[in-house]
Image (spheres, helix red, strand yellow):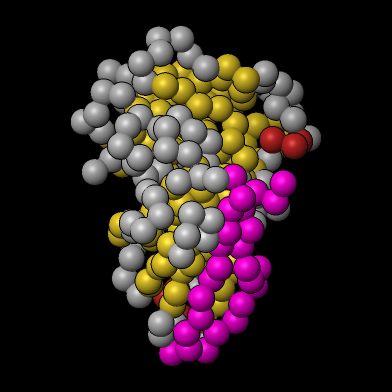
Amino acid sequence: NAGVTQTPKFQVLKTGQSMTLQCAQDMNHNSMYWYRQDPGMGLRLIYYSASEGTTDKGEVPNGYNVSRLNKREFSLRLESAAPSQTSVYFCASSEILGGSEAFFGQGTRLTVV
Amino acid sequence: AQTVTQSQPEMSVQEAETVTLSCTYDTSESDYYLFWYKQPPSRQMILVIRQEAYKQQNATENRFSVNFQKAAKSFSLKISDSQLGDAAMYFCAYRNSFGNEKLTFGTGTRLTIIP
């Protein structure tokens, strides 16, 4: 049981380059999330998808786009990377019920130079 | 919007002692869940314990227990008999019970265990 799989694990981009972070879950969860983690800032929500076909902005959506391709996959795209987007990115998924545990991918360490 | 605040960026405790991590939150909802997640150096996020707001009894999981004060909007985590493996970042998190709501995290507390 793979759980939540994120790719890539590490990436270095030049300012202005674009890239897509991929996320897939095999637990049939409806809810999926993208967070970024920065020192002293905790996990901040970038985008959230309550179900296939729906996406909502989180706390820090500027500079990002997302696609909920199907129930399994939720991708995060940086159209024009900036040094401020250097961070560790986490994808997560959970069931609809509020008390459901969220399962996380291993994270992507992204450096923009 | 709901907010979660962790006012202790770092804490340390002697091995085998007890430590309490603090968390406060703000919400206008009456039914919600609160969580503590652990993130060891491996970066993997691990659920430690969860509490439903409607339950009076504080949740307990082995050496981990919470002190949930609904009126004060406080949700602290107590770790008893601290072990070296407890060293990690600890995040408090909030989610409404209904409506397929998002999961909101605090800024985290880094816990160091002193041998």
| Residue at figure coordinates x 37%, y 20% from the top left | B53
Q: How many marks?
A: 0
Residue A61 location in percent, x, y?
33, 65
* Of residues B57 and B16, the one drawn nearer to the viewer in this rendering: B57
Residue B105 location in percent, x, y?
42, 44
Please identify the residue farthest to the top as the structure is shown.
Answer: B57
* Of residues B58 and B21, the one drawn nearer to the viewer in this rendering: B58
Rendered view: A21 above or below A36? below
Rendered view: A47 above or below B53? below
Which of the 4 image quadrants contains residue A9? bottom right
Left or right: where A14 falls relative to B100: right
The magenta span reads A1-27
Residue B89 in sight here: no
Rendered view: A35 above or below B47? below
Left or right: where B80 falls relative to B107: right
Which of the 4 image quadrants contains residue A63? bottom left
| Residue at figure coordinates x 40%, y 13% from the top left | B55
Residue A72 in sight here: yes
Residue A109 location in percent, x, y?
60, 68
Left or right: where A20 falls relative to B73: right
| Residue A8 among magenta residues | yes
Rendered view: A92 above or below B73? below
Please identify the residue farthest to the right as the structure is shown.
Answer: B115
* Of residues B11 and A56, the one drawn nearer to the viewer in this rendering: A56
| Residue at figure coordinates x 56%, y 68% from the top left | A22
| Residue at figure coordinates x 41%, y 67% from the top left | A67
Picture quarter with the N terminus of chain B: top left
Which of the 4 image quadrants contains residue A105? bottom right
Picture quarter with the C terminus of chain B: top right
| Residue B22 among magenta residues | no
Please identify the residue farthest to the left as the structure is shown.
Answer: B28
Residue B113 location in percent, x, y?
70, 37
